[in-house]
Amino acid sequence: MNKQTIIEQVQWELGQLERLKQLALALYAMPEDTRRPWDATAAAKFIADVFRGLENLCKRKSRYLLEEFPEGPDSHAQILLAFLGPEGPGYALNPEIANRLRLYKGFRHRFIHGYGFELDWEVVEEPLRLLPETVDALIDVWKLWLDSLL
């Protein structure tokens, strides 16, 4: 993969995260009395998608750098560790944002392996409220990574 391709792919993923942020903002802004039973499920999906987006970005980076990409039962934890590790793009992230990513990884697992209708708004409210700030931090980190390629 050449440099222009990785730049375009990462920019596309960042655009998806930005769109996700806008949807999360709209969902969070819904008045409580207008929320429907499936809104908590949608919120959990948005939260899980933040981690999916991070994984997609890390996978694209690995392909570009010809690095091995984690597979198997603990691959999601390995991806996050590598992203936040000393050589990872997220190394300098605020510890609070890093902790949120761990939480979002858990939502990903819960959303994939559980039943969405079992979620309550109280469980998703805070992670959804914090999602825009988390996405902004991820976008900043990946833009810095792209800048390092130039």
Image (tube, rainbow, N blue to C red):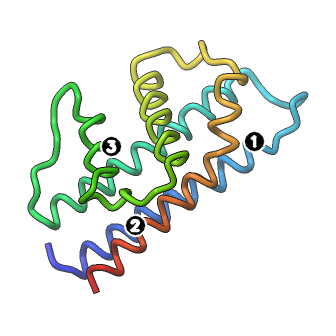
Expressed as whole percent of the image width and height from the top left, the position of residue 114 reads 46, 15
Q: Which residue is mark 2?
A: 142
Q: Is residue 11 above or below residue 68?
A: below
Q: Is residue 143 above or below residue 85?
A: below
Circle 2 packing at 10 Å, graded few (<14), some (14-19), many (20+), is many
Closer to the camera in the image, 103 or 55: 103
The numbered disc on residue 28 is 1
Q: Which residue is mark 3?
A: 80
The Cα atoms of the two marked residues, 3 and 2, are separated by: 14 Å
Label 2 secondary element: helix
Label 3 secondary element: helix
> Could you tell which of marks 1 and 2 lies nearer the N-terminus?
1
Name the residue rendered at 63%, 34% in the picture: 43
Q: From the image, which quarter does the C terminus lie in?
A: bottom left
Q: Locate residue 108: give its quadrant.
A: top left
Q: From the image, which quarter does the N terminus lie in?
A: bottom left
The Cα atoms of the two marked residues, 1 and 3, are separated by: 26 Å
The Cα atoms of the two marked residues, 1 and 2, are separated by: 25 Å
Closer to the camera in the image, 101 or 26: 101
Q: Nearer the viewer, mark 1 or mark 2?
A: 2
Position of residue 16 in the picture relative to residue 44 (left or right): left
Name the residue rendered at 17%, 41% in the picture: 70
